[in-house]
Amino acid sequence: MGILEKIAEIEREISRTQKNKATEYHLGLLKAKLAKYRSELLEPSKSSGAKGEGFDVMKSGDARVALIGFPSVGKSTLLNTMTDTKSEAGAYEFTTLTCIPGVIPYNGANIQLLDLPGIIEGASGGKGRGRQVIAVARTADLVIMMLDAAKGEIQKTLLERELETCGIRLNCRKPNIYFKLKKGGGVAFNSTLTLTKMNEKMVQLILHEYKIFNAEVLFREDCTADQFIDVIQANRVYLPCLYVYNKIDCISLEEVDRLARSDDTIVISCQDRLNLDFLLEMIWEYLALRRIYTKKRGEPPDFTEAIIMRKGASVEHVCHRVHRTLVEQFKYALVWGTSTKYSPQRVGISHVLDDEDVIQIMKK
Ligand SMILES: Nc1nc2c(ncn2[C@@H]2O[C@H](COP(=O)(O)OP(=O)(O)OP(=O)(O)O)[C@@H](O)[C@H]2O)c(=O)[nH]1
Ligand SMILES: [Mg+2]
């Protein structure tokens, strides 16, 4: 029996099983089994290597955004309107066959936008180019899920499921569970709060399924079995996602209004160039990049070129970007901006910076 069949069988059994106290453990086990098979599927296939051709695009710029969507929703059209790159767009499905990168310059940063082939239901199981497309999505900093406004929300549900299956978690944090494999001593289970969805027996059962008999587990959050499995699997990626409904020129204003009110959602029309500025703003917000300006002693700050950093970047990260030996010579830094209580403030190397902070680094 192939992996796909095994997966299908477990999925069938899960949907057949009623959810109640008596079946709780059985379900937990099935979920663990399912996750195991699915990650086998995620590993690159050893047979014929030609399949991934054209998908390995160099990471460039300050952040990477991947366009995921069904065929013909307007992904290539968006790339063509937002960047200087040309990606063929057509009225027929599967116009794009590889990964085509473009660059959006915005707020002094270069954002790499990747146009990808459309994916369809069953992509995670290897249909079409689904697996390669999803593999590219895993390397992105932000996923734009492009949807056809006229096709309703079904596309969103289907795509979310495909990405979920491939270990991509959208718009959520990593579960707060401490998990460490041990050499001996059995399973040490603990929690810092009352758990309503899990208990020690379930944890043991799931760990057994993974043939883990010695480990330290600490729940710091009221997590579900699925979340615990995610932690054990350790190959999950947690990405922000923007749901972008394109082709709003084809639907009624009431419908547009309704769609636009959902969470993490933007409505646009590539054809009529509607709302594209706002889309850019949102991309920027979701990427959460930080512009840091440097300043030399006795001179005004250099606002012409920002150092682009990730959210949570500290003074140390900035030092590394300026010069590789700067960290060793670092004495303290002066920071002007929203990350400090007053400006300028003298800070140490671990101080975390905010967007548009100005920094002056003092050497020993
Ligand atoms: N009405 C309308 N049509 C659009 C809009 N944006 C794109 N289209 C049309 O939709 C069709 C498909 O566009 P593409 O950009 O090729 O779609 P794609 O998502 O890249 O498709 P694949 O590469 O096959 O996955 C083209 O005929 C576009 O002209 C829009 O905002 N409104
Ligand atoms: Mg395309």
Image (spheres, helix red, strand yellow):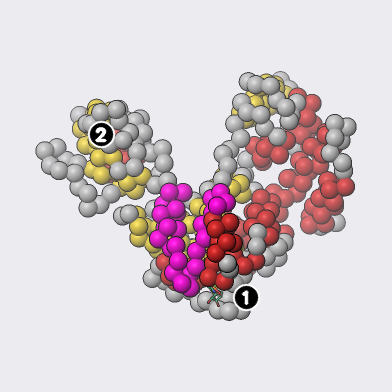
In this orientation, does residue 218 appear? yes
Q: In this view, does 228 lie to the left or right of 283?
A: right
Whether residue 281 appears in magenta in the rendering, the answer is yes
Q: In this view, does 198 lie to the left or right of 105?
A: right
Can you tell which quarter of the image residue 160 is in?
A: bottom right
Amino acid on which the number 2 mark rests in the picture: Val
Residue shown at the point (40%, 67%) measured from the top left: 83
Q: Residues within 10 Å of mark 1 (few under 14, many from 20)?
A: few
Q: Is residue 233 above or below residue 37?
A: above
* Quadrant showing the N terminus: bottom right
Determine which of the numbered discs, if any, sits on residue 335 in the image: 2
Q: Is residue 178 above or below residue 118?
A: above
Residue shown at the point (58%, 42%) measured from the top left: 172
Residue for badge 1: 93
Residue farthest toward the bottom in the current orientation of the protein: 91
Q: Does the residue labelled 2 lie within 8 Å of ligand 1?
A: no
Rendering coords of residue 100 (x, y %): 49, 68
Which numbered disc, 2 or 1, marks the residue that appears first in the sequence?
1
Residue shown at the point (40%, 63%) measured from the top left: 103
For the record, the magenta segment spans 261-287
> Element under label 1?
loop
* Quadrant showing the C terminus: top left
